[in-house]
Amino acid sequence: MTSAPSPPEPLPGARLLFSLDPAIAYLNHGSAGAVPVPVQRVQQRLRDEVDANPQRFYTRGLYERIAHARRHIAGFFGADPDGTALVANTTVGIAVVLHSLGLGTGDEVVTTDHRYGTVDYAVDGTGATRRTIPIPLDAPTGKIVAAVRDAVTPGRTRLVVVDLVASSTARLFPVAEIAQALRGTGIPLLVDGAHAPGSIALDVDALGADFFVGNVHKWGFAPRGTAILTVPPAWRNRIRPLVRSWADPDGYPANVEYGGTLDYTPWLAAPTGLFTLRTLGPERVRAHNVALARYGQHVLATALGVDPDTLPDPGGPVPMRLIPLPGNGFADPTAAVTAAVALRDRIADELRTEVAVNPWHGRLLLRVSAQVYNRPEEYERLAQRLPALLR
């Protein structure tokens, strides 16, 4: 049996950067993130500025301020600022891509069974057919790439959607290799990078994807409502916003970003979140979070009687880990979703701990995240109390 990993040393002062309820063990940074206090304060000052003179805020230099924030955010993650638009979240970015491609009946979109659930709704709304590729939790890189390449059909497949870090399974996908395998087929690749910015070493342009969408408000310390959509030059003239506004003549990316009297304060405050991450040290933060998530996975698995050697490998350094929960599984997908939500809420209410519980192929997967405000004892306390709750 693999020896227990050691927890990392805490980053001095990092816990004080957050206003999370100290009575709650927040082991679910991956779902909605957590905004550092300095970023909250900057956003509040921006809200105060808006309310002090709304007319001035929306009509004097707003385009330029958004563009400045966009350049800062895009550059931080290795994305071309001229090809990057700020959007509210990954769901919106994916909708923009699907809308721009003009998909319809007879078209096919290929995804994997690790995809985020709302992608199904987005694709179904276009009239296109979804084709889902099964990828085992422990599949090696070569088999993943081959499965995607073998699933596409030139002339029928109009788009491939692959997660970079899957929400339901915390699996890191080899999207650069998939992009290379699809090159020359005429089939574009959309990378769902909802969990990528800030959680892993990321160079968006180096991935070689046709479209990349990623949330900055999860692991990038930005206010919620901040994400990037990056598009290479060949596609930019084809991007169409979901709502046409006064920036429509300006083309991409302004036509996607601007929507009148929206709340732009999350985007304008986002560079402060990246400054916070840079101050802590991105590599240092990632190393801490990966090590702590691995430690938490091990102590929880051991407490639940799961052999740590059988735990799914995420495929790379990610700050989220899975523990497959004991049980016989669910034949009815709806019942699995209901059970997952009920268990997540019981853990929150009875154990005062926030985690994610996701159904996957009839099984329930407990997903724990790790961020600089977490401590080893939070996972240890959950490990002590969770077995009794599950019984």
Image (cartoon, helix red, strand yellow):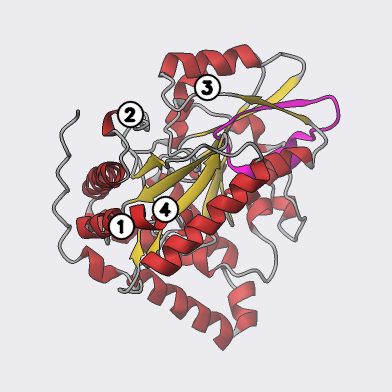
Identify residue for label 3.
179
Q: Is residue 9 left or right of residue 270?
A: left
For the residues labelled 2 and 3, the Cα–Cα distance comes to 30 Å
**Where residue 30 sits in the image (x, y, percent)?**
43, 52
The first of marks 1 and 2 along the sequence is: 2
Residue drawn where x is 49% and y is 19% of the image: 144
Between disc 1 and disc 4, whose residue precedes? 1
Task: Determine crowd level at label 1: few under 14, some 14-19, many 20+ residues with C-alpha closer than 10 A.
Answer: many
- Distance between mark 4 and mark 3 Cα atoms: 42 Å
Residue at 43%, 59% (x, y): give it.
33
Name the one closer to the observer, 240 or 55: 240
Asked if marks 1 and 4 touch (Cβ < 8 Å), the reply is no
- Residues 31 and 17: in front is 31
Q: Identity of the amino acid at label 4?
A: Leu
Residue range highlighted in magenta = 98-118
Q: Quadrant of residue 309?
A: top left
User: Would you name the residue on which mark 1 appears?
Assistant: 382
Which mark identifies residue 310? 2
Which one is nearer the viewer's eye here, 288 or 243?
288
Mark in front: 1 vs 4:
4
Extreme residue in the right direction: 105
In this rendering, the answer to whether 130 lies above or below 389 is above
Q: What residue type is labelled 1?
A: Leu
Residue where numbered disc 4 is placed: 390
Percent from the top left, x then y, of residue 10?
A: 16, 57
